[in-house]
Image (cartoon, rainbow, N blue to C red):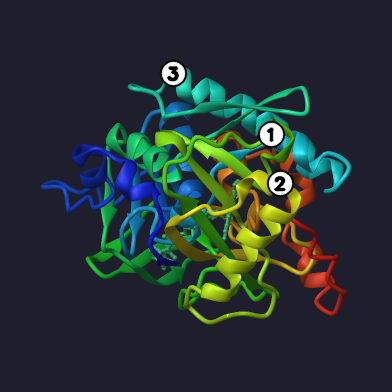
């Protein structure tokens, strides 16, 4: 969920905006090969990968509008190299694969997904408007439905037999829960420690100032001559509000690091919530003891970056039945075993 006013919807065309609120199709396949629950970046990227992985229908359901969760408020940075030496190698490896997958998606998806190049510390990195990427992917998927919630599952012989939704029962061959945080769905036993870490973002009025490239994690130029600043890590602040004092502190910290930034005017300010687990790593796994159900959530600071590689791994796992090696580090059992584990430090960016 995003509170305040993010810049991303204002950058979209009317057609792209319309893609974020897809209605019910005239004909709905209630027994698709893959049902994806959750219309954030992970759900859409997984749907795109499943469509490409093989025949059979793929349906996405989202209880709100596409991008209504954390995805719609993210900074949209795709910078695996910024995580090198900071995060575990398995995360950095998947992030690097995912930046490649983003480039491939941008070139091969009809109309592209709006990837923009970013230079950082001698590396070619990238960024996206996350809502544009979601809208562009959704525009060319066969079936994406907004305003539909998955409420319950019925387990039949070690598999999800049916999913009860607000538009009735569906009987998918396979189901992926890409729900941001662990799914809260009756009949699905997924009890892992999870939280959300709030972050504020701001975008300035147009300015002639260009921040030094080395400062991209703090402030970066975006379209229209504006600067985008953030996000903060507001650990412990769970309130769904934008705090003016946090915005003021962000500007003061920018000015302290870069005195030229004095006097910038704020045009957009918003806050959103990073889904997190105690070790700050995502879950990308099959649902324990269910042969046809997968889940991915808890992507914390890197869900936009990780989406295409995660989606590709899940699509391949569903197709082949074998766990792809690049997602082994993100199995859910590490959380079931370490519920009392201390949190890894909540570091910056
Ligand atoms: C300030 C800030 C800056 C960030 N910057 C970056 C960045 O620069 N780069 C980056 O890679 N990441 C960034 N992130 C992290 C990123 O936003 C998240 O990791 C990512 O958006 C998670 O995507 P998701 O699809 O898993 O979850 P979400 O976007 O939350 O999507 C999950 C969706 O599932 C839906 N849903 C849940 N339950 C159901 C149900 N039962 N039925 C139907 N639908 C359901 C929800 O409504 C939601 O829309 C940032 C986050 C914050 C807060």
Judge: label 1 CB < 8 Å from ligand 1: no
Tell me if 111 is positioned left or right of 265 in this view.
left
The mark nearer the N terminus, 3 or 2, is 3
Q: Give the residue number, with chain letter if any, for mark 1.
A: 212
x%, y% of residue 308?
55, 36
Q: Position of residue 13 (x, y in %)?
A: 24, 37
**Which residue corresponds to mark 3?**
108
Q: Categorize mark 2 by other alpha carbons within 10 Å: few (<14), some (14-19), many (20+).
A: some
Quadrant of res 316: top right
Please report whichever mark, 2 or 1, sits nearer to the chain's N-terminal start: 1
Asked whether disc 2 touches disc 1, contact meaning CB atoms under 8 Å apart, the reply is yes
Alpha carbon distance from label 3 to label 1: 32 Å
| Up/down of 150 relative to 227, above or below | below
Cβ of mark 3 under 8 A from ligand 1: no
- State if disc 1 and disc 3 touch (CB < 8 Å): no
Measure how far apart labels 3 and 2 are at the Cα level.
Answer: 39 Å
Q: Is residue 133 visible?
A: yes
User: Is the residue 314 above or below the residue 285 in the image?
Assistant: above
């Amino acid at each position: 969920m995003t509170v305040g006013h993010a810049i991303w919807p204002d950058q979209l065309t009317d057609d792209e905006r319309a893609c974020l609120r897809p209605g019910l199709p005239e004909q709905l396949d209630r027994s698709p090969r893959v049902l994806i629950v959750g219309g954030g970046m992970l759900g859409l990227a997984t749907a795109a990968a499943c469509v490409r992985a093989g025949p059979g229908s793929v349906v996405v359901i989202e209880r709100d509008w596409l991008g209504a969760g954390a995805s719609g408020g993210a900074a949209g940075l795709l910078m695996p190299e910024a995580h090198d030496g900071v995060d575990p190698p398995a995360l950095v490896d998947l992030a690097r694969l995912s930046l490649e997958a983003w480039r491939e998606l941008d070139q091969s998806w009809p109309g592209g997904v709006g990837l923009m190049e970013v230079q950082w510390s001698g590396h070619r990195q990238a960024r996206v408007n996350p809502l544009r990427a979601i809208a562009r992917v959704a525009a060319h998927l066969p079936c994406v439905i907004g305003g539909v919630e998955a409420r319950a599952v019925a387990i039949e012989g070690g598999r999800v037999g049916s999913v009860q939704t607000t538009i009735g029962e569906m009987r998918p061959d396979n189901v992926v829960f890409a729900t941001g945080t662990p799914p809260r769905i009756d009949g699905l036993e997924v009890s892992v420690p999870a939280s959300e870490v709030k972050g504020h973002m701001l975008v300035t009025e147009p300015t002639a100032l260009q921040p030094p490239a080395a400062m991209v994690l703090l402030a970066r130029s975006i379209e229209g001559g504006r600067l985008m600043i953030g996000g903060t890590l507001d650990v412990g602040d769970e309130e769904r509000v934008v705090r003016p004092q946090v915005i003021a502190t962000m500007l003061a910290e920018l000015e302290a690091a870069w005195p030229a930034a004095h006097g910038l005017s704020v045009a957009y300010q918003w806050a959103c919530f990073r889904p997190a687990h105690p070790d700050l790593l995502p879950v990308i796994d099959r649902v324990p003891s269910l042969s046809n159900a997968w889940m991915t959530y808890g992507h914390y600071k890197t869900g936009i970056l990780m989406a295409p590689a995660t989606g590709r791994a899940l699509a391949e796992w569903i197709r082949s039945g074998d766990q792809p090696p690049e997602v082994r580090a993100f199995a859910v059992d590490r959380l079931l075993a370490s519920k009392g584990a201390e949190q890894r430090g909540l570091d910056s960016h």
